[in-house]
Amino acid sequence: MKLNELRDNPGATKARKRVGRGPGSGTGKMAGRGIKGQKSRSGVAINGYEGGQMPLYQRLPKRGFNKPNRKKFAVINLGLIQKFVDEKKLDVKKAITEDVLIESGLVRRKLDGVRVLAKGEITAKLNLEVTGASKAAVEAVEKAGGSLKVTVAVAAE
């Protein structure tokens, strides 16, 4: 077999329908769009419109609930804290607060506080003070000989 003998399977490709090419083609003049009306014009997109009938997306029931006063925390993992300690961007001797984390560049902004999660290994003896932490994160820090203090955020009303 040579490259010039390669062919697609018969019926695998279909010729494009060329509309508006004379009466003999079967799709001449109106090009299969019918007569007049919005859909015969170009540039029409009536997605989701069902001719005045209540659209499907409005007929289906709504589900769930979005809490309007939900707290959004900046999330950091223990492995990332350890990496910053190794790179000497965080000082282990001092208490590591949320402001210190922002200054080091580990957290961009506080939002409603910083929450520590237990992903990654921690070996440094840390003294962390954050708004929230998972139980596993608290255990991991204490196992490494440090302390993780969870402060209660005061609601800014």
Image (cartoon, grey):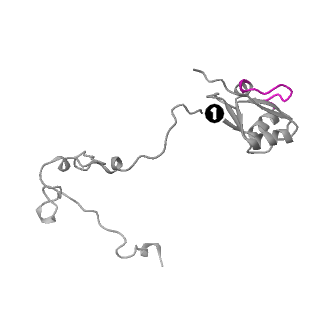
Q: Is residue 130 above or below residue 15?
A: above
> Which of 93/63 is in front?
63
> Which of 55/107 is in front?
55
Compared across the picture, whether 142 is left or right of 7 comes to right
Q: Position of residue 149 (x, y in %)?
A: 78, 31
From which residue to which does the magenta span run? 88-99
Crowd band around label 1 with a 10 angstrom C-alpha radius: few (<14), some (14–19), many (20+):
some
Q: Is residue 130 magenta?
A: no
Q: Is residue 38 above or below residue 26?
A: above
> Which of 25/53 is in front?
53
Q: Position of residue 22 (x, y in %)?
A: 13, 60
Q: Amino acid at mark 1?
A: Phe
Residue 121 lies in what quarter of the image? Answer: top right
Q: Secondary structure at mark 1?
A: loop
Q: Residue furthest right?
A: 145
Compared across the picture, whether 76 is left or right of 56 comes to right
Q: Majority secondary structure of the magenta segment?
A: loop
Residue at figure coordinates x 22%, y 49% from the top left:
51
Q: Is residue 112 above or below residue 16?
A: above
Residue at figure coordinates x 82%, y 28% from the top left:
91
Q: Position of residue 102 (x, y in %)?
A: 69, 26
> Which of 64/82 is in front?
64
Q: Which residue is mark 1?
A: 73
Q: Position of residue 107 (x, y in %)?
A: 68, 31
Q: Residue furthest bottom?
A: 1
Residue 7 lies in what quarter of the image? Answer: bottom left
Compared across the picture, whether 44 is left or right of 23 comes to right
Number of numbered tags placed on the structure image:
1
Question: Which quadrant holds the C terminus?
Answer: top right
